[in-house]
Image (tube, helix red, strand yellow):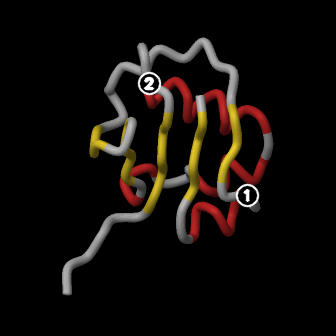
Amino acid sequence: MDVLYFAWLRERIGIPKETVETDAATVSELVAELVAREERYATAFADTSAVRVALDQELSDFDAALDGVREVAFFPPMTGG
């Protein structure tokens, strides 16, 4: 699946997008796999309360299942204006 990073997440991880092979069943499990990879992911996901997620371009949450998902996007909370 494709994993996209936006704003300060992209800056901390150092890439805007990557293709990930995973056995994770949920977004939380995917994040745990990423954090275990390298320190840069641990830094980016240190406070998941400050991170939002979209699955196939629909807002979701960290408990959501990844079955059939082709794209996961992580980004900071959006503000209106």
| In this view, 75 is above or below 71 | below
Q: Nearer the viewer, residue 36 or 76?
A: 76
Q: Which mark is residue 15?
A: 1
Residue type at mark 1: give it. Ile
Q: Say whether residue 52 is left or right of residue 44.
A: left
| In this view, 68 is above or below 44 | above
Residue type at mark 2: give it. Val
Residue 8 position, x and y percent, is: 57, 70
Helix, strand or loop status at disc 1: loop
N-terminal of the pair, mark 1 or mark 2, is 1
Quadrant (top left, top right, bottom left, bottom right) of the C terminus: bottom left
Residue 2 position, x and y percent, is: 60, 36
Q: Which mark is residue 54?
A: none
Residue 58, by quadrant, is top left
Query: Label 1, label 2: how many angstroms apart (C-alpha)?
Result: 21 Å
Give the residue furthest to the right.
38
Residue on which the image places disc 2: 69
Quadrant (top left, top right, bottom left, bottom right) of the N terminus: top right
Look at 73% across and 58% down and name the residue there: 15
Q: Which mark is in front, 1 or 2?
A: 2
Give the residue furthest to the bottom.
81
Helix, strand or loop status at disc 2: loop
Residue 6 position, x and y percent, is: 54, 62
Residue 66 position, x and y percent, is: 43, 21
Q: How many residues crowd around disc 1 within 10 Å: few (fewer than 14), some, or many (20 or more)?
A: few
Residue 7, by quadrant, is bottom right
Q: How many residues crowd around disc 2 within 10 Å: few (fewer than 14), some, or many (20 or more)?
A: few
Q: Say whether residue 73 is left or right of residue 19.
A: left
